[in-house]
Image (cartoon, helix red, strand yellow):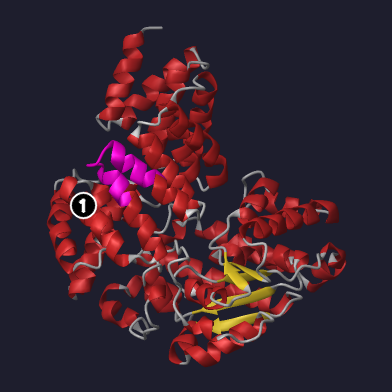
Amino acid sequence: MQPTQIDHAFSLIAAGQLNDALPLLQNLADRDPSNGQVQYGLGLVFLSANQSERAVLHLSAAAKSAKKDARVLATLASALNINRQSEDALVPARKAASLAPKSEYAQRTLGEVYSDLRRPVMARQAFEQALKIEPRSARAHLGLYELETTLGNGEAAERHLAAAFEETPDDPATLISAAQSRSKDLQENALAPIERILSGLPSGAASPEITKLAMAAGKILDGRGETAKAFRYFDGYRQGLYGSYNAKRQTWFVETCKTVFTPAFFEARKDFALTSDKPVFVVGMPRSGTTLVEQIIARHPNAAGAGELQFIPDSLREMAKGKLHEPAFFDGVLRLDKRDAQRIGRKYLGLLESLDKKARRVIDKMPHNFENLWLLALLFPKATFIHVTRNPADTCVSAYMTPLPAYHSYNANQASLGHYYRQYQALMDHWTAVLPVSLRQQSYEALIRDQETESRALIDHAGLTWSETCLTPPGEDTQVFTFSRQQVRQPVYSTSIDRWRQYEAHIQPLLTALGDA
């Protein structure tokens, strides 16, 4: 094997020429699959291409043959963390930081993992260590910006964002963060370089970074009130983040749910039930108000918010061997017996215990658990179930203007988003009719218009006594990771109601797809 071929592949990666580097590395891997450097290169390509799951496979192989290479271990930790495997990421992240205590990258990666594991003290220490090593590290400043933002420390967050912008004013990651700034000056300073980057792209250029830059520009222009220009950015660059949406498959999935999950299905599996009433499941479409509901309940002295837990979706993906929304999923459902179901339930309860042993209620606000309510109702009939609803047009416009992760493929265009919303609505109608649990329908608009009355009803539904703390925004002891993290720390406001009307002229395909929804 010629070492120059590997060197050439890494030079292509450094130049961003991933499509050229990939076949070269794959050819080298075919000839020598145990070569750790080649596997590392493949991991970098897939990580750069936003394919974290494939990156993890190659980086794990690289780490086996490079057990003391801090760079490889830190990159593996980063890929695992991006792939929402933060607990698994902690081991290689710690090892990398130990092997290379003077590596800014290793320390920063450890900070990112600690932050996502909701260990803010450890995260801050790691980020600050990275800045001691490299005081001008824009990425370490951005890590601290994200951390302080999740904690609601606005002034500290803005200082780190300003420092990052000063160091790398043309870096896409910095510009995307600057669009979220509370500083109008920083937003304005970010707009010109974003537009310059986008205008210089070749025709048809697409990547997750491009889509996020375009949405960042749209957000800034939306804040200015320039809705037409903002929507051109929201509407015109989406292909970089989202693949194709299979409308037929989603329709088939919902229709099959209706035929499989019947009252007889639940009656035949009553003995699957566990006795715990600790879980609180908050479900609904993204951008429907689930974060607000979570935080109201989580402010209760006997409750804790867990954010959007991946455990249930991951467990079902494993059961279906990765083939969700396909026949293999329903085959797995019908084969699932009491022992295996309760094994999932007990592991889930163990996760809730690890997050907060003292809380009587722990809130899991994974919105898309609305597809998994059949299993949650079987395992936890004594749990609290809340379905958050919001005006369909407001929900969809907010989702459309948000860079949701790539697996939200329905966010690809207005028609696909409207179709998915109607399928979600049909499935929720079915669950309301057949689930053997009490499912509270919580209107976002009602909560905004009369926060105390609705909050009291939520707390009562969760089986808790009322506490005035439920009316206060989350404090600095609470990390909020969702796109609503800044809004939930403000007093409840009504400007988000009927906001879709500002964009009515630009969302006719969405409104047509929603129909009478």
Q: Position of residue 201 (x, y in %)?
A: 18, 45
Quarter of image, res 386: bottom right
Q: Position of residue 460 (x, y in %)?
A: 65, 86
In the displayed structure, 115 sits above or below 202; it is: below
Report if residue 214 is visible in the image. Answer: no
Q: Main secondary structure of the magenta part?
A: helix
Q: Position of residue 10 (x, y in %)?
A: 32, 23
Kindly identify which residue carries mark 1. 163
Q: Quadrant of the N terminus?
A: top left
- Residue at 17% of width from left, 57% of height from top? 190
Apparent side of residue 278 relative to residue 287 in the rendered image (left or right): right
In the displayed structure, 222 sits above or below 2; it is: below
- Residue at 60% of width from left, 88% of height from top? 457
Q: Give the camera-side residue of 128 and 494.
A: 128
Report if residue 174 is visible in the image. Answer: yes
Q: Which residues are magenta?
A: 126-142
Q: Give the camera-side residue of 514 and 149.
A: 149
Q: Callout 1, which amino acid?
A: Ala
Taking the magenta stretch, the answer to whether it contains residue 128 is: yes
Give the residue at the far top of this rendering: 1
Apparent side of residue 80 relative to residue 342 in the rendered image (left or right): left
Quarter of image, res 414: bottom left
In the displayed structure, 144 sits above or below 54; it is: below
